[in-house]
Amino acid sequence: MVSITIDGQTLEVEAGSTVLQAARRLGIDIPTFCYLKRLPPLASCRMCLVEIEGQRRLQPSCATAVTEGMVVRANTALIEETRSSMLDMLLANHPLDCPICDKGGECELQNMVMAYGPRESRFRDDKRVFHSEDIRLSPVIIMNVNRCIQCQRCVRMCEEVVGAVALGTIEKGMDTAVTGFEGSLAGCDQCGNCVEVCPVGALMSFPYRYKARPWDLAETDTVCPHCGTGCQLTVGTRKGEFMRVRSKWDEGVNRETLCVRGRFGLDFVASRDRIKRPMIRHDGALVPVSWDEAGDYLRRRLLAVEDKAAGGLASPRLPNEVLYQFQKLMRTAFRTNSIDCSSRWSTPFDTLGPLLAAFHSRAPLDEVIGNDCVLVVGGNVTEENPVTEYLLRDGVRRRQTGLLILSARPSRLDADARVVVRVLPGEEAAGLAAVVAGLVAAVGQALPGDVLAGIDATIGKPAAETGIDGPDRLAAALKEGRSVTVLVSVDLLRSPEARATLQQINNLLQVLRLLGKDPAMQFLFDRANQLGAWDMGVLPAALPGLRAVTDDVARATLARDWGAKIPSEPGADLDAILELCVGGRMGALYIVGTDPLIAYPDRDFVTRALGAADLLIVQDAFLTDTAGLAEVVLPAAGYGEETGTFTNNEGRTQTVCKFREPAFEARSNLAIFDFVAALRNQALRPSTQGEIFDEIARLVPAYQGLTQHALGADGAFTKAVPTPPVARFFAPPPVPAAGDRLMLITGNCLFHNGYLSERSDILNTVANDPYVAMSAQDTAQLGLSDGDLVIVRSARGELTAQLKVDRRFPKGLVFVPENYRALRLNGLMRRGEYPCPVEVQKVHATLEVDRTSRIWRGV
């Protein structure tokens, strides 16, 4: 620690702290323009100059490190005159168009001039004008170069945090201008972080432009509904109408940054595709009815099918309270444990449960990626969890974290990684087993003899024998690290090899623990509340708190509190539920907020299954493909129309706030559950959001002690429940045989997340058209070129889209984003087969594009 005195106040700070940081801790205001907390200091704006005893000139406080005994003056006549002069220079060429500038009312330059600026300018020359009209850099970003004050925040944010390098500067001095490559932002993420950090109105959001003034907006702090990173955001509405999203630098895991989906993708709440009234099927068509009519009809139908099995499926985008109440409804009123929370895979809870209990770290992401080494397994962080990518890049560049990647898909993070290992989907387990073998071979002597004997029978083959290039380098890097974090992409759960992969992750974490590496593990979920859905027990084999359904004590505790008996046998998972439907054994299938018809990896099978259920009930905000098959459709509140909580990838529980009223005749999800329970002559108690949260905090061990009022702006962390150390090692899977066929994989693209975001008009203006990504080797071999229209054909079906050649893509893989409803990608797939064998060929017929769906059709 070192001591510093600022304006007569003395403080001890950590060595390496800057004068600006010390001043802010003392509550002393020093103005800045170019400074941002998460960027390295630039010291270009000169607004933060201070006097330091013993120094001849004023020094920039943002870039001056504290030394022992330093004496600083932050407010003197000379400093005031210098700040005023700097502002006068900025105003010399700044246009005086505040009345029409979107930044008016929240402009940092306005605030600075009012606080520190001159009352009258000394400059009389004509103002410099770069362009007479604003420049539309992209569909969502518009620029007024004349307002730019050359702080460079936008350029540095784009390069150093986002990693897109889409913005740069030309010329120098007062002629410096920020621009995109060739005057556009065609290659950028469209995340709008440059707009967020711009202190003036130089960079603006085009969708928000001229819509409202800051003082017109009712602002609500809430949580992003897209991926599981759990970014804090502030939604602005005007007279109940959605206007914009912004973020705050001092709140949340995201620290002011958002991805394109979070900043521009919330307009889906106003989608025209809302379900307006309850509907029942009559003469083969869905007919709007009143809630009372829907209730009378549903009561009769539920009574008619009560002797058959029941099942339920709920979306991991729903709040914890809704998910908790859903599983309680299914287990008590419908007397079934056949519930699941993913429409894309069945969760292997027998392996997942012990892994979560033993190794999942419920701690800040910033803390866990501060470890010596971070290993990312599977997925594409850039496109699945963009803000997590920003934080990982920050860890690598500023804290020298060693980033290691083992995945099938390339990502932008590859450029920052110390080791990158490309594996084909399904090879992850063999690759991880080889890493464990490499670690044991390198440091086996450091392990106790009895432990080593237990591992010897289960470790995989050395890397040289797997045919996978790179596991030995991963093992060497992990061996050198003092502490290790493993980030696991939920994308791995798509594969039939998911159980084996999770087992090998378990092996790796056990070995790292035995070696004293203090391993931490978190999942990278692509749904906002996937961890919450698991915690709430929306699983066939697990109760709330991830306790096994077969645990008599846990089941008795809940049954006593709920006042109803809980079935003791594990229920059917998603696959088994659909099998029950096809076999004619499913009475009532209750689907809430999710669309398996478009997401389940076998469209033909799920269509037959949903059609074979005696009674299909769909509760949703939007008229999905699955709702189109339902017998009863119940209109539910959507995101932003009910309050609740999400639990993000870190295990942080945050408040999701209501910022608009439910549309048309929609009711809250909790109110609909009460409605359905009453039809079964049951009463769900408690039934309000606050009371349900209190029950969760009382009955779910990881949430015990939480209170809603204490969640605050940053949320509160659930706690890991202590469990005995896992002592079992799993045998490695056989190394998959190399094939020579092209294999189709899928996942999210940067601009879309699942199918919810496809209802955003703004995202649809910036998103790529549907595309097929392949390696340069494969396309060259097939005689294909970037931009060609190609047909991707499997044994089940085919689709047509534009080819995107990716030179970093591994040979043998074909990637198509899962986010385009009109493609019906799952029509190509067969359940239990992932990746899917396909053929790709160029389209030679004349085609035209349907501009509504952006799908190519023959003419």
Image (cartoon, grey):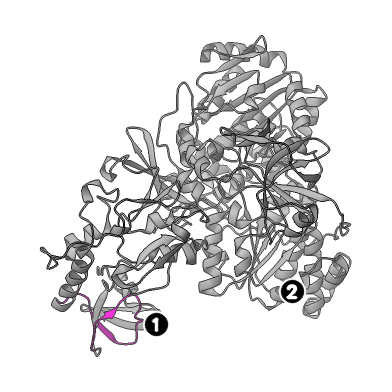
96 or 621, nearer to the observer = 96
Assign the N terminus to one quadrant of the image: bottom left
Q: Residue at x 79, y 39 (%)?
A: 831
Relative side of 440 to 32, left or right? right
Most extreme residue toward the left, as rendered? 120
Q: Amino acid at mark 2?
A: Arg
Sequence-wise, the earlier of marks 1 and 2 is: 1
Residue 177 vertical placement versus 584 (above, below): below
- Number of marks in the image? 2
Chain part drawn in magenta: 56-76
- Residue 1 is tagged as 1
674 or 164, nearer to the observer = 164
* Quarter location, residue 174: bottom left
Relative side of 342 to 219, left or right? right
| Residue 108 location (% of width, % of height) | 27, 59
Q: Which residue is mark 2?
A: 473
| Residue 505 location (% of width, % of height) | 74, 60
* Quarter location, residue 156: bottom left
Of helix, strand and loop, which one carries label 2?
helix
- Whether residue 559 appears in this view of the structure is no
Assign the C terminus to one quadrant of the image: top right
Of helix, strand and loop, which one carries label 1?
loop
- Whether residue 232 appears in this view of the structure is yes
Q: Residues within 10 Å of mark 2 (few under 14, many from 20)?
A: some
Q: Residue at x 40, y 42 (%)?
A: 207
856 or 413, nearer to the observer = 856
Residue 739 vertical placement versus 332 (above, below): below
